[in-house]
Image (cartoon, rainbow, N blue to C red):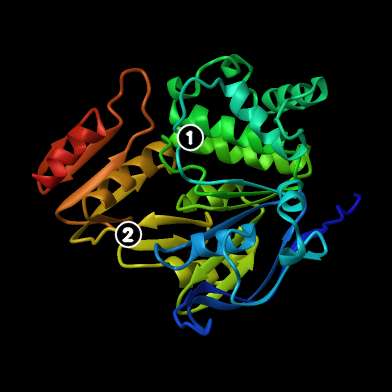
Amino acid sequence: MENREMESTVVINNLTIGYRKHWRKDGGSRSKVVAGNINASIQQGELTCLLGSNGVGKSTLLKTLSGFLEKLEGEIMIMGKELGSYSPKELSTTMGVVLTDKCDVRNMSARDIIGMGRSPYTSFWGTLTREDYKIVDEAISMIGIGHLRDRMVHTLSDGERQKVMIAKSLAQETPIIILDEPTAFLDFPSKVEIMQLLHKLTREAGKTIFLSTHDMELALQIADKIWIMDKKCGFAIGTPEDLAISGDLEAFFTRKGIAFDPHSGLFKVENKLHKTVCLQGKHGILHNMVKKALHRNGIGTTRLPDENISISIIAGGDGEVPFTVSCGEATYTPATIEELLRIIIS
């Protein structure tokens, strides 16, 4: 099998980010450091997700990498060239940025908004050529929003607007796209759709995509690389699987009531258990769902016989009730997990 060559489109060396405040008449300043000693790279053709708690500096980092905020120290190399040496026009043809803010405009169609991505290439008057419109329509097709092209932007749902903004960045024809919380304000199916779409763009269009997100579970399932940003521990960078094996995911994100499952590579809510019942029978979806429902209600399970409560999972079929519950000398046959819980909790 041929090994896929990965090119580092963004390289960060000894970067310190924060805010520089000018406060003296002689031009002196003082700085507020948010994070320092950042060394990392972002690869072409990969979706990289930045995770971290609120206030850790994710937005500051994205603004610095995008050129909106001046770095305090270090080096940011974009396509082999220091970020600070780019002119605004050069940067606008190298990096597209999609911010969290909602696109709150009226009387403009989705196609008009996407066409604004061509502004770095148009004349002084911003007039689009036939070639520009061709690129806009290709971006619309790639994102799969042809049915939205003539809709007014203010009539679109949050998820539809986000797709329009991603299409705008595609029309900008930049090798790098940076997004700040692109799944904020979206329902869960839309979050999944947007993340899968961004991953698809890295593969099919060869884009370098870097984004911040609070949707940790989605990032761990879809992203190629994860950056974990933490005030105490600094940065951990790697594939979701490597970070799981190294223990970095558990160290950074395990909090009270949250546990990392090394078998699935995901996190789960850890409920405090106040009693245990015996759960027997064939393992399968029914067994797993009963166990999940019990844990959600603070009830642990064991396969060892319990003198007070014992639940047996029956194979089911031909109208057979799937459970039997023994509570002391009494035996019950609940037909659903809801009925089973009523018996156990009562």
Q: Nearer the viewer, residue 35 or 329?
A: 35
Q: Quadrant of residue 125?
A: top right
x, y percent for residue 289:
35, 41
Q: Position of residue 239 (x, y in %)?
A: 65, 60
The Cα–Cα distance between marks 2 and 1, rounded to whole angstroms, is 38 Å
Residue drawn at x 51%, y 64% is: 60
> Could you tell me the amino acid type at mark 2?
Glu
The image shows residue 340, relative to residue 34, as above or below, that is above
* Element marked by disc 2: loop
Q: Amino acid at mark 1?
A: Cys
Q: How many numbered badges does the structure rendering display?
A: 2
* Camera-nearest residue between 259 and 150: 150
Quadrant for the C terminus in the image: top left
Secondary structure at badge 1 equals loop
Q: Is residue 259 above or below residue 35?
A: above
Q: Is residue 175 above or below residue 340?
A: below
Q: Quadrant of residue 299?
A: bottom left
Q: Earlier in the sequence, mark 2 or mark 1?
A: 1
Which residue is found at the position 64% from the left and 32% from the top?
116
**How far across and down, in percent of the image, does residue 273 sit?**
23, 60
Whether residue 307 is situated above or below residue 71 in the rendered picture = above
Residue drawn 71% across and 53% down? 88
Lateral position of residue 260 relative to residue 135, left or right: left
State the residue position of label 1: 103
Q: Which residue is disc 2 drawn over?
A: 270
